[in-house]
Amino acid sequence: MGSIKDKVAIVGVGCTKFGERYDKGADGLLVEAVNEAIADAGIEREQIEAGWIGTYFPSSGTAGVALSDPLRLYHIPITRVENYCVTGMDAFRNACFGVASGMYDLALVAGVEKLRESGARGIPDQGDHPILGRGRSAPGSFALTATRYLHDYGLDREVLADVAVKNHRNGAQHPKAHLRKEITREQALEAPMISSPLGLYDCCPTTDGAAAAIIARPEVARQLRDDPVYVKGIGLSVWTGRPYFTAGFDYRHWPTTQNAARDAYEQAGITNPREQIDLAEVHDCFTITELLNIEDLGFAEPGTAWRLVKEGDADPDGSIPVNASGGLKSFGHPIGATGVRLIYEVTRQLQGRAEGVQVEDPEIGLCHNIGGAGGNLAAVCILGR
Amino acid sequence: MGSIKDKVAIVGVGCTKFGERYDKGADGLLVEAVNEAIADAGIEREQIEAGWIGTYFPSSGTAGVALSDPLRLYHIPITRVENYCVTGMDAFRNACFGVASGMYDLALVAGVEKLRESGARGIPDQGDHPILGRGRSAPGSFALTATRYLHDYGLDREVLADVAVKNHRNGAQHPKAHLRKEITREQALEAPMISSPLGLYDCCPTTDGAAAAIIARPEVARQLRDDPVYVKGIGLSVWTGRPYFTAGFDYRHWPTTQNAARDAYEQAGITNPREQIDLAEVHDCFTITELLNIEDLGFAEPGTAWRLVKEGDADPDGSIPVNASGGLKSFGHPIGATGVRLIYEVTRQLQGRAEGVQVEDPEIGLCHNIGGAGGNLAAVCILGR
């Protein structure tokens, strides 16, 4: 494995208001996010040489025409990427390869999902377990992880509540978050149970949204703006479609995140993530997921992530801010959009213009996206000034 | 737009027998094609650093796990690409970017589709035309093109029959073709009508199949084999999801193919395709499509492609062999597989080891893949020794 370190720079980002967007279809959300990114980059649409679009559900659009038609971006190459919940970040990764290869000077990547009008609100058919039968839902799968994690480390649900309280507090400050309200520890702990031990506030909402980024060769980027953000490393690790219930699956960590981080760190020259990374936006589809992510990314020893959250180290003014945006907890997880939104958030943080809570003067940021019900695949991208 | 000319080489290719493959699922077909490519490259599976998988129908597999699970290729990055009928070639294109970017030394690209067990055999819902209503099928759409083409150039159905006879003759010699039988002009003309003027032999069959390629940096490729094939140029052009029935749509040519060819030719230094290209595998989902392709690719003037076919110039021993493999006419069009199969065919031709009919000593070959019912998107890839 080689590297594309500093071969690609982000010159513009855009993001819709996330939420119940019954006012627009996937096409309308894409227009909103992409036009913001174009304006942010200060380019003309005609300068875009190639596009990548991330959607998971076919109902949110298939093929390159899912991007060309809404934007009237005709007669350029556009690829649709789908990679479960890593769809957005993998679309970004492939766009980066397009630029780093020398083929394109300037490219667009966008992700979108209309989750409130897709099949996502029903119980997904993810295949039947021979014993447990049908109806394995996302909360049900992640609940298995939470149960094992809490049991093995002798913890209780309060450590999950701490994640929810932090991320809701951050999200309340972000104008584009879906859920913009603080909650108390008591609210989290007393909320209706979804799939034990995960209560309502342990789960991210079901959300519509889109996000976009314009990337360029560094020489082009520096002509466009004084503060481009560079791609330092990007890793993707794919395991299996069915890690759960298979022999040897350890519900307390996911090798996919560990492998993706290892690759991205190696490319970026990160040997001590806790010290070298100034902020992280991680995939907290459930509160338990954030705890696993913190450990899998090397910010804390196994079984200790809860302490980092409880003691304020993961707060925006802490030693390793995690989800200063409010995370998926506040933004939901419109699948194709999420990975690109993470790029959006970290880019703006590194430029000192975060919406919501700005972390103090970060130089290196991490974006982390997982796919499937934990352990199926994961991507890590390191950005830097 | 830049270029990736000579930055990527093909070191191994594989392809299943195409046909009614009720004996295997998409996973089994992938194993068959990929293992052949691995053996052809003379590598160990563990050397594969990254993968790209092309599938169109979710029933043929989604996300990177569609490739990792069948092959047990775990803990590497794998991207799923979907781009209508250009899915296979766009997966190849993105894999090329991955290698050309400097990130990977050796990568796998595979495409698969189980068309006989998907929704493809029913009438697709491609959206309703306000006047013509529901049920616009692929034959129905391409029939509109055939009608206009034949009318405007004063031709009759016999020019279509000539394409069918040529491609069936070629395919009869190819051990991996779905339909391996010669037909006569009379058979073609007297066959049951599918959608006037397209009869049974004007349509490609409904087919299962998979294809794969291993690509590498040129330095790595030359260590693996004496005859790697280089990517000289690759173009993709995306237009709209609904070109048909829109004002100004010219049913006699597709700007997507023209644009994709223009880009690929520019990268490869092709200024006179008829002279410089030694063979072409083009997307003949219907006989009329091949005639349009021949013209859109610059091998013949508008309205004259039929003459090139009729007079033998497009035969394997002609001046510009088109579909020496038998084309989609003989192979069918398992969507994710087709673009990769084109790479397979042209690679083996350039290496002098074509299955079926070998063209005499070709140095430069062209692969062409279209998506949607004509005019939605198209890709062109130039390969050379």
Image: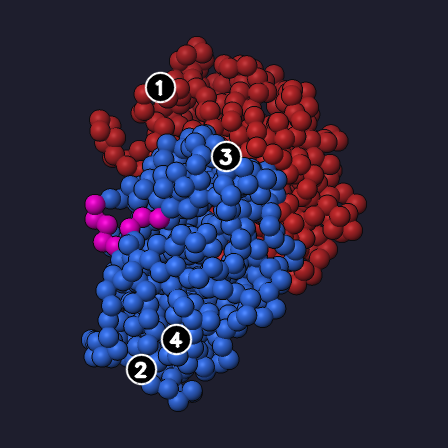
Chain colours: A red, B blue
Element under label 1? Answer: loop
User: Toward the viewer: B63 or B8?
Assistant: B8
Q: Is residue B138 left or right of residue B4?
A: left
Label ID, residue B158: 2
Chain at tag 3: B
Whether label 4 touches label 3, CB < 8 Å: no
Whether label 2 touches label 3, CB < 8 Å: no
Question: Can residue B269 be spotted in the picture?
Answer: yes
Residue A95 appears at what percent x and percent y?
Answer: 58, 47
Q: Residue furthest bottom?
A: B154
Element under label 3? Answer: loop
Say which label, 4 or 2, has the lower sequence index. 2
Hey, what amino acid is under mark 3? Glu
Whether label 1 touches label 4, CB < 8 Å: no
Q: Residue furthest front?
A: B360
Hey, what amino acid is under mark 4? Gly
User: Toward the viewer: B380 or A78?
Assistant: B380
| Residue segment shown in magenta | B15-23
Residue B112 appears at what percent x and percent y?
Answer: 35, 49
Q: Which residue is mark 1?
A: A248
Chain at tag 2: B
Label ID, residue B49: 3
Residue A356 appears at what percent x and percent y?
Answer: 65, 38
Instruction: Reply above or below: B249 against A365.
Output: below
Tag 1 and tag 4 share a subunit: no
Chain at tag 1: A
